[in-house]
Amino acid sequence: MNISSKHRIAMALALLALPVLTGAKANGCNDPVVIGGDGGSGGGDDSPACPGFERLATPEELALTPMDDPGAEVLAREATQSFIAPLDVYERVKRDLAAIHAMDPDLANISGAHRSLVELGIGWTEAGKAAIDAGTYHAWDCLNEYYGATSFTNFDRTPVTFLRFAGNFDMEMLAREYAKLPEVESTDAAGLSGDGSTACLSIDGEEYRYILDLASGEDCMAGCSDHLYFGFSTTPDGMVTPLGSHANSDSAVPAWFTELEDCRSRLY
């Protein structure tokens, strides 16, 4: 995706937030259009794969998401680089987080949950925008049905649509499929802006290692100034071992924090 397309989707995402901040619709953001109606994931037993597109998950896998703990689901999906979180990994992560939260109640609200609130941003050509506005664009119908799209939001001032799904997916992978559609100029995952407390997971065989980031500061929408990181290691039998803590203001960096570089890349 080129820079101008990324900028267009980023600007539309900012416009999408304006009614919340101002109570107005002067940004040209229209009301969400509901797709389907049951709000569930797609991929029923009789749902065919869409011709010309890669099937990222089976109907049975699609039926698993969303799971009841979105934070654990996100961590399991990200750590395994999967389109949908593997159920066995999810169950382990859910159990591990519960044990970590019980061990340190100050961390009880920290997981990867906010990263489940991701939409698919689609930038249209002029013809695509006109068809979407007229309700005559149907090339995306099969993908929308298969992956359980629930609603989309358009803008009057920019040719961008934000598409929402019931399932918790790797939206970058899904974006590559929607990019194959006719009259689509760009696609990108569009998440919540700002900063805040979050977590990440690294899996090395049977050892799961977590970083929980307790973030604070005067203006976390612009980026939290203070981060206190807590590390934990877990085993399959449920044993949790604290690895220590590290503040972003500390000059000395502990070895466990350095080793989890890939995990840390998912915190921001």
Image: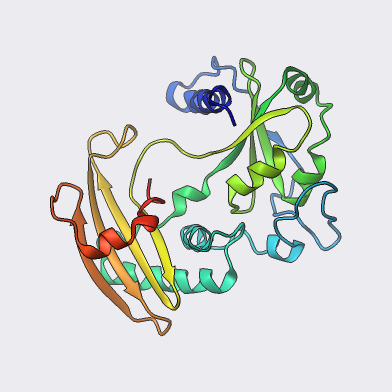
Residue 124 falls in image quadrant: top right
- Which corner quadrant holds the C terminus? top left
Which residue corresponds to the image point at 43% horizontal and 55% vertical from the top-left? 112
Farthest residue, direction bottom: 237
Residue 5, position as x, y percentages in the image: 58, 25
Tell me if residue 28 comes above or below residue 183 in the rendering: above
Residue 142 falls in image quadrant: top right
Residue 113, position as x, y percentages in the image: 46, 53
Between 4 and 218, the one lying in front of the other is 4
Tell me if residue 83 comes above or below residue 195 in the rendering: below
The reply, left or right, for residue 203 in relation to residue 85 is left
Residue 180 appearing in the image: yes
Which residue corresponds to the image point at 48% horizontal and 62% vertical from the top-left? 79
Residue 32 appearing in the image: no
Residue 30, position as x, y percentages in the image: 64, 23
The reply, left or right, for residue 234 in relation to residue 253 is right
Which residue corresponds to the image point at 35% horizontal and 57% vertical from the top-left? 109
Tell me if residue 36 comes above or below residue 185 in the rendering: below
Which residue corresponds to the image point at 61% horizontal and 60% vertical from the top-left? 84
- Which corner quadrant holds the N terminus? top right
Residue 2, position as x, y percentages in the image: 57, 27
Residue 144 falls in image quadrant: top right
The reply, left or right, for residue 3 in relation to residue 199 is right
